[in-house]
Image (cartoon, helix red, strand yellow):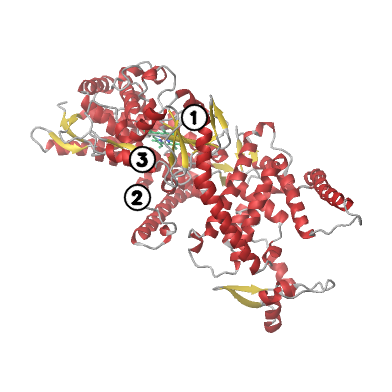
Amino acid sequence: MKAEADRVELDVHDHDYLKLALPHFVKWKDQYGGPFLYWYGPKPRLCIDNYELVKQILANKSGHFMKNDAHPTFLAMFGKGLVMVEGAGWVRHRRVLNPAFAMDKLKMMTRTMVSCAGCLIKTWEDQAANNKTREIEVELSKQFQELTADVISRTAFGSSYREGKQVFHAQKELQAIMVATFLNVQIPGFRYLPTKMNIRKWMLEKKLRNTLSEMIHRRVASKESGFGDDLLGVMLEACFTKEQGEEHDKLILSIDEIIDECKTFFFAGSISAPAAMASSFALALIALLVLAVSWIWEYVVVRLIWRPYAIAKMLRIQGIHGPPYKFLKGSNEEEKRLKEEAAGLVLDVHDHNFLPRIAPHYLKWRAQYGEPFVYWSGPKPRICIFDYEVARQILSSKSGHFVKNDAHPIVLELLGKGLVLVDGIDWVRHRRVINPAFAMDKIKMMTQTMVCCAQSMVKELEDLASMNKNREFEVDFDKPLQVLTADIISHTAFGSSYKLGMEAFHAQKELQTMAMASILSLQIPGFSYLPTKRNRRKWMLEKKLKSTLMHVINSRLASQGSGYGNDLLGLMLEACTATDKEGEEEQLSLTMDEIIHECKTFFFAGYETTSILLTWTVFLLSVYPEWQERLRKEVFREVGKDSPTGDNLNKFKEMTMVLLETLRLYGPALFMQRKPITDMTVGELRIPKDYAIYIASPFMHRDKKIWGDDADKFNPLRFENGANRAAKVPHALLAFSIGPRACIGQNFAMLEAKSVMATVLQKFSFALSPRYVHAPVDLLTLQPKFGLPVVLKLLDV
Ligand code: HEM
């Protein structure tokens, strides 16, 4: 019917365009009367034209009538902005946006509106003046569209209006895609397939997001000098509110929500959807063709060919060299080959330089091209930094210009958007909520739990040893240490709900194993949505993980009267609950999803790292028995046979030195990554926006210029005067990172490691089993490839 109506033209005095724009409504209304029902695919739509019914539905304040589900592309364009949000979310958004549309603010924008209109009129005037007849023909609807886009770019984004225009164009193209696909049959999952149209759509969505995100981050960074008088500025102003008695600003909308509101400004403010939808199928076909050509141009020519060569050239000019870029593969093949060659390398147990095993490509390229060098992960460049000063400037930067590099999708999936991965003002919000949980006095209170867990592991090992006449036995010690650290994090994070916490962690661990198994296999786009056996198991685990964590969190929230508890979750919820300004409602400054992500982060960031630190500490104390003995003496000197307390542990000086030296030589976290959100200069190095920077801390920890000639040796004494005096530069130990994004759990990890080591040293002596093979391996964290078999001997104490 629409195609037929498309061929009809109306007389200019005929304003009844319904037969053209909505011919199906006109026909069905005539045929079936009002209200009538029709079908959009399998979904029913009830059409109402009765004023009283309309009033009751639209004016209803119960919140029971919500917006209908939007078309996915429509959602991508609009985002979850004011037009789309519902319920409490809508109240929050509306509260932030209202001030931006107050009459006095709008009046201030009139000048911009008039000036934009003036520019258009001036263009017409100039064109008309060039004609003898002083008249011109213009395509008014197009020009008005341009005009409103101009007005909204300037009023919404002020001085950033040029970027605002880019947003407008990306949104317009997305709209064309929506029109072209609107009436197509929607095959479930089809939108996840990498068709040319979908790829273009994803690119546009990414561009839209990145441009808006950058603009917002810049505004937030320059917050001290005011947010500006444009819509974005007024919205950000209303978004940052200082609660009574609070030291810092509180953010009402998340950065994602602000981005969605910006999309809404544009869509609602400059384009009318019904007009767009009236476009013809012919237009859709042309759009498809244009999209295909532009996809080939943008994706193949620009991204895979031109950009890598341009980047390499720009870096060469700065004197940064590296292996040549190969189409699509980058340096992957050479990296893979070098790693395969190194995989069989076995080290002597006194040899702590494992770099030829885990990073042979870095060693080769550094020798060949110098420092820093650039290599290619597929078409993406990685600039590798070995210099302490450059690393310090990047990691310590507080401007918010260096953010975390895009995480591998698998890491993202596992970790969720928790503290480790969030950036910008979201990070500020998360960090503020989580900081109190890691305050020293709170962590000290957890020491008892840590020691208790360690004692029950030691008791089990003791029982095994007592079964042998010589009171010794061999064990793969990395395994009980893994179980122990999971036990500790379950207890300290979830207190009395630790059993449920443990269940959640087991689900997460299995998900992690599945993810690691697939990390190197070919990723077929869309494959993850197919109901294969593996995917179904994955979905089941994800569901279980989420529902278990939700259950734990909800029961805590429900028991608020008796306090949230002294475990990490309780302390986080405490900091998370803030009373609404108007007084009534209690609001969480993190959403339920964000709290769930933080719980996952506790486990992911806090469990494996600490179990690996313990594993390498046991390894080194086995290789250097004189240090094992020194630490045992220290433990007996400080606590005798008693259980250590938080205060005792802080007095373990030699233990601290050994742990720091272990972190230097065998730090669990290997390469830190960042990227600048805008072009940045660090020292003499100019780093263009979005280039990944890899900070090669395992190399830097062995730098003889910084650590002295014995940098490759195990020498805990270098930390005798504290971590900051151990090397020629302060903050040379990067194992917990430095700067604002340094590890929030470092005190927790150190206390945990001391609790466990003290408890083990009180009962056992240990030595490496002859089965031990020294082959450290990079599995996201640094691990002993063949585990840690040791002989444990029960002490006669
Ligand atoms: C030996 C043990 C640990 C090591 C070596 C370690 C290492 C690190 C490093 C290097 C970072 C910074 C990453 C970067 O800058 O890209 C980091 C961040 C972080 N760590 Fe740890 N970590 C350890 C234990 C823990 C524990 C026990 C927890 C929590 C229970 C934890 C939670 C976190 C969190 C939440 C962050 C992100 C902080 C932020 O971005 O604000 N870590 N850790």
Other residues around mark 2 within 10 Å, as few (<14) / some (14–19) / many (≥20): some
Query: What amino acid is at disc 1?
Result: Leu
Q: Viewer-proximal residue, 248 or 18?
A: 18
Q: Secondary structure at mark 3?
A: helix
Query: What amino acid is at disc 3?
Result: Glu
Residue 443 appearing in the image: yes
Q: Nearer the viewer, mark 1 or mark 2?
A: 1
Q: Residue at x 61, y 39 (%)?
A: 217
Q: Are marks 3 and 1 in contact (CB under 8 Å)?
A: no
Other residues around mark 1 within 10 Å, as few (<14) / some (14–19) / many (≥20): many
- Mark 3 sits on what residue? 334
- Mark 2 sits on what residue? 503
**In whole angstroms, how far apart are the C-alphas of marks 3 and 2?**
41 Å
**In whole angstroms, how far apart are the C-alphas of marks 3 and 1?**
29 Å
Q: Which mark is residue 395?
A: 1
Instruction: Give percent across and percent down for residue 772.
Output: 19, 35
Q: Residue at x 37, y 15 (%)?
A: 721
Residue 179 appearing in the image: no
Q: Nearer the viewer, mark 3 or mark 1?
A: 3
Query: What amino acid is at disc 2?
Result: Glu
Residue at far left of view: 469
Q: Viewer-proximal residue, 175 or 382?
A: 382
Q: Say which quarter of the image contains residue 641.
A: top left
Q: Is residue 22 above or below residue 96?
A: below
Decide if ligand 1 comes within 8 Å of the CB at mark 1: yes
**In whole angstroms, how far apart are the C-alphas of marks 1 and 2?**
36 Å
Mark 3 or 1, nearer chain start: 3
Q: Is residue 330 above or below residue 11?
A: above
Mark 3 or 2, nearer chain start: 3
Residue at far bottom of view: 31
Q: Residue at x 49, y 29 (%)?
A: 395
Mark 1 or 2, nearer chain start: 1
